[in-house]
Each structure stands twice: as C-alpha cells, then as structure tokens.
Image (cartoon, rainbow, N blue to C red):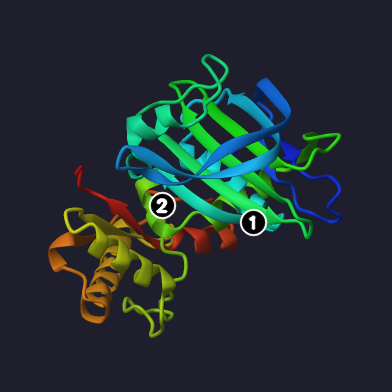
Amino acid sequence: MRWPAAIVFCLAPGLAGAAPTLALPETATRTVQDIEKMGSYELPVGPWRSGKIETETVEGEVTQTAWRVRETGLTTMALLAPLRDQLAAEGFSVIYECETDVCGGFDFRFATDVLPEPEMHVDLGDFRFLSARRDTGDAAADYVSLLVSRSSDSGYVQMTRIGTAINEPIIEARISPEAIDDAVRSSVSLSESLDLSGSVVLDDLSFPTGSVELGAGDYASLSELSDYLKAHPDRKVALVGHTDAEGSLEANIVLSRSRAQSVRNRLISDFGVNPGQVSADGVGFLSPRASNLTAEGRTENRRVEVMITSTR
C-alpha cells in the first residue's frame, strides 16, 4: 500500500536529532486528546493471564491521543510497523508487543484503558498493542503505549504517553510516502508479511546466468520461511516463479517453474521443510510487477515469490 504525504508526530522535540516518533497518512485526523498533568497509569507489560493483565505502575504527565485514518484496506500491521520502527529510532525499547489473541482478546481490550467510541474504535477480532520505555538520564523515564485497530473504512491509533511534562506533547510535520514505505518494509518480517498480504517476494535469491538451479549461499529469506513453516505445520505455501517478457510464454513458464522447483528442493534438503507444505509452479511473464520496457523493470520481474495456499 502506498500512502500519500504523511503527518509526523514527535513526542519529545527537545531531543536533538531524534527521529520522528509517530508517522501517519495525511488522511489521519486527531479525534481526541486528554492530558492529566500529574497522574499514574497501569501500563500493560504482558498479556491477560489468570484473570488480569500484567502491568507496571508508572507516574508523570499522562497524555492520551487518538487518530482516525480514513483508508480502506489498511491493516493493523501496516499501521503499527512504521510507528514501532520510529519509536526505536528515538531510543525507546519495546517492553511488550502482542496481537489480538496473544494479548488476550476481549479480556485484554476491556482491562486496558481505551478512549471511548467513536473517537477510538477497537475491533475485538483485530487489534495490536505495544508498550515501550525510554530512559532519559533523569530519575523519571518516558513510557509510551500504542493501540491500533481498524473498521471497514478506517484505521485507528491510540497513543498513551507517560513522563515528565513537556510544553508541546505533539508536533506535526511532514514525511514522504517513500520514507513510510521503507519503514514498513524494514520493520515487517517475512512471517508478518505473509500473514499481512498473503505473499512475499524472496528478493535475496540468486540464480547463475542461464541456470535454473538456485545459486549456493545462505539465504535469509529461506531460513525465515523455514522457521515460519515449522511454526505453522498446518499451513501450506506455493513457490511461484516469474520471468521477464523476453522469449516465448511457453519457454518462460518452463523456466519459471524450474526455478521455483529448485527453491523448493533447497528448502527441503537444506532446511528440513516438510515437502507436503510446499509446492512449486511458474507463470512466466504473466504477472509482472514492473515494466518490461526497461532493464531495471525486467530485473525486478525475474523473481520467485511465496504465497499462502491454505486457509487454516
């Protein structure tokens, strides 16, 4: 997904050279903000378990802000990933992160301090939470929690900040859509991308010129895919080969299928993947992701991608 220009929200403008803390599309509008000059907050640092959420009591200025992002098809991972990346860039360390069921589902949601509807909407079947801490060198530390969810036509973000009082708790600026795309790509793992979009291009694979056999080497994408399949033994994936548009369709389908099969063989022989979880096929040049009129586009079109084929 490509967002238009975005708004950046900085938590601590006094930190020289700090990266933005929150970046949201320009379609984001602040729906509510509540500031308690001095208070305490039960910050979730674990899931709902044994009738309660594991929390840490933190004190300071408590600021809660919610935004609505009017975008259809916006996933909670696409919302959270760049925000998490920017928190890390500002020196925050994640204390706890979870998604719906891992958090504790219904129980976690209703035991957590959430701003009211309609300013902040939480889908009980699709939300993500994160809490983080940054040491400031003083006695007090800064704490942040993020809760993201969505409806059929919008995404929702709630930020809770607890720390020393600052004059401007939120500063708005601009960031390019390319920067947000980069943040999403760098923050989301292969397994998260598979769950998010259903398919992932294995960009680090290399085939020697004129060969259908995968080149020697340790491929991070295959290691991650192996871990994913072993962690989800009930899921199946297909490896799909793609080519550029040079040559006949029949020849390119054979080439693309052979390369996908080579990747499957490597997963089975070197990574111990269950053969029943992986199939291989090829579609030649029928599904380009770039123009075949340029050398760069043809290079981008020569690829193997993995897609989930099971529904369990």
- Left or right: 172 as drawn, with respect to 58: right
Residue 88's label in the rendered image is: 1
Q: Secondary structure at mark 2?
A: helix
Q: How far across and down, in percent of the image, does residue 119 sit?
A: 57, 17
Q: Is residue 115 left or right of residue 235?
A: right
Identify residue for label 2: 192
**Tag 1: residue type?**
Ala
The x, y position of residue 66, in whole percent, is 62, 26
Q: Earlier in the sequence, mark 1 or mark 2?
A: 1
Picture quarter containing residue 29?
A: top right
Q: Is residue 41 left or right of residue 107?
A: right
Q: Is residue 305 above or below residue 206?
A: above
Residue 201 image point, x, y percent: 42, 58
Disc 1 element: helix
Q: Residue at x 67, y 41 (%)?
A: 59
Q: Which tag is nearer the camera, tag 1 or tag 2?
A: 1
**Residue positioned 34% across, 30% down in the render:** 106
Q: Nearer the viewer, residue 148 or 178?
A: 148
